Amino acid sequence: MIMKKEFRILDFNQLKKELDRYKFKQLHIHHTWKPEHKDFRGNNHITMQQGMYNYHVNSNGWQDIGQHLTLFPDGKWVTGRPFNIAPASIKNWNTGALAVEMIGNFDTGNDKLDGKQKEEILLLIKYFIDKYGEQSIKFHREGPGVTKTCPGTSLDKSKLIHEAKNLGKVNNMAKLENWQKVQGEKALDSLNKKKDNDGNPIVNSPEDWKTKLSENIPGWLFWSIIDRISK
């Protein structure tokens, strides 16, 4: 019997807002193994999710699709089981868990976790580390009695956690550069009102300089620009 279920496609900001409404103990990370990357055509998110739902319900005899979320190769998230219902994920560890299936076969020699898909799972890992601690991150193969390689032999949990934790450094740098941009624009507006001894503006093409200040530039270069445009 084929049953239709409503699924939604989310970006990470939308997903984060929803996750903030719940409390979790663990993040369970899986790969689908089948389907693989080659089965994703760029626009068949819902069709693939519906296929997994049908298999889980009709073949496995479950009440719903097993996972809360599926992460596609393009970095899009598709909702599955309601967040307030325990997943069919890792035996004896399901209570309080958020279960994620990543489309792909990440056993060595098959699909590669990269691009947007990798960026998004790192964001989710970072979210869980920040809220629940590093110990909350669980690969399926870590579960009691599990013999599968899931989420794939090519994936190293310690490396993914290291990369996810470093996202904080990237975010802090981005905030600093945004602060530099704001300060630079204020300086430009102030300097643009000033004249040199001959009555000429001391800043040439201030709008062009504002464009340069909007670029992702290191602090030393920012202050060098300020020094240059004030001469």
Image (cartoon, rainbow, N blue to C red):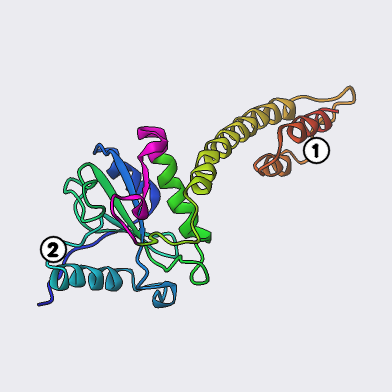
Which residues are the magenta region? Answer: 128-147
Residue at the extreme top: 197
Q: Position of residue 31 (x, y in %)?
A: 37, 62
Q: 214 or 12: nearer the eye? A: 12
- Snapshot quadrant of residue 47: bottom left
Relative to 116, residue 15 above or below: above
Q: 95 or 126: nearer the eye? A: 95
Q: 82 or 29: nearer the eye? A: 29
Q: Residue at x 51, y 67 (%)?
A: 108
Q: Is residue 146 magenta?
A: yes
Q: Position of residue 165 (x, y in %)?
A: 51, 39
Relative to 106, residue 160 above or below: above
The secondary structure type at the circle numbered 2 is loop
Label 2, label 1: how many angstroms apart (C-alpha)? 68 Å
Q: Position of residue 229 (x, y in %)?
A: 80, 32
Q: Which mark is residue 103?
A: none
- Snapshot quadrant of residue 213: top right
Q: Is residue 108 magenta?
A: no
| Mark 2 surroundings within 10 Å by alpha-carbon count, few (fewer than 14), some (14 through 19), many (20 or more) | some
Q: Is residue 31 left or right of residue 106?
A: left
What amino acid type should be assigned to the residue bearing mark 1? Asn
Q: Which residue is mark 1?
A: 204
The secondary structure type at the circle numbered 1 is loop
Q: Which residue is mark 2?
A: 62
Looking at the image, is mark 2 or mark 1 earlier in the sequence? 2
Q: Residue at x 60, y 31 (%)?
A: 176
| Mark 1 surroundings within 10 Å by alpha-carbon count, few (fewer than 14), some (14 through 19), many (20 or more) | few
Q: Residue at x 26, y 59 (%)?
A: 8
What amino acid type should be assigned to the residue bearing mark 2? Trp
Q: Position of residue 230 (x, y in %)?
A: 81, 28
